Amino acid sequence: MTEARSRRVFFALWPDDEATGHLSALAQSLATGGGRVIRPASLHLTLAFVGAVTSTQVVQLAEIAAAVRVEAFDLALDRLGFWPQRGILWAGCRQTPAALIHLLDALAFELRRAGFAIDHRFGADRVPHITLARRVRCPSLPRLGTPIRWRVSEFALVESHLHPSAASYRTLASFALKGAEA
Ligand code: 3AM
């Protein structure tokens, strides 16, 4: 029997608690004209969306990701953005940091080598971002004064469960970056 591609997975960065607190406060303060604020535990930056895979492939993906050897780095989110079609309010980077591209390149290389095609770098919108709220109407975007920073010491393989109201995410495995191992 063929195994069902019933698992919807992606690779992502999860901000640390302090950055999550800042992002969540920002989301609350900006999405005042309606819209759905993303739960703090769901705030993430998508590295690579893989899509529907089998459970066997989930195990394979975790093995592939464990082979990625990239240094830990500091990430600074220094801009807010808004995509009007879906009313997406997000935080991101004025310029994509070289270290972030390097991590994605290393991951994409390993994935491609194992036969997984990653078309959508940084997710469907192809811009590194953390979605703060959805279905927001015309927010006034302040300049983000002090950047929101965290040390990226790991990345995660995450499973997404779609529900009518919102997606929920479950971390299946985390992969430490170099210099960050305990
Ligand atoms: O909602 P955001 O953008 O924060 O980027 C999408 C999403 O994060 C991406 O995966 C993340 C978790 O769902 N994503 C979802 N569906 C996708 C698709 N069909 C997708 N990226 C590419 N293709």
Image: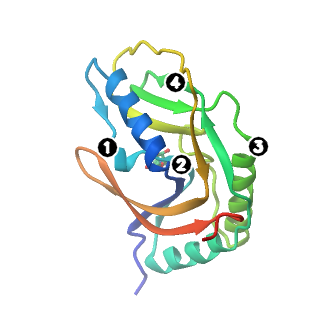
Residue 141: % across, % down? 46, 15
Farthest residue to the left: give it: 164
- What numbered label is drawn on residue 39? 1
Indicate if the residue with disc 2 has its beta carbon within 8 Å of ligand 1: yes
The amino acid type found where label 3 is placed reads Ala
Whether the residues at callouts 2 and 1 have beta carbons within 8 Å, the answer is no
Distance from Cα at disc 2 to Cα at disc 1: 16 Å
Q: Which mark lies nearer to you, 2 or 1?
A: 1
Q: Which residue is mark 3?
A: 98
Pick the front one: 166 or 153: 153
Left or right of 158, for residue 161? left
Residue 131 falls in which quadrant of the image? top left
Residue 127: % across, % down? 60, 36
Distance from Cα at disc 4 to Cα at disc 2: 16 Å
Under tag 1, what secondary structure?
loop
The residue lying at 31 percent from left, 34 percent from top is: 37
Pick the front one: 112 or 61: 61
Whether the residues at callouts 4 and 2 have beta carbons within 8 Å, the answer is no
Under tag 3, what secondary structure?
helix
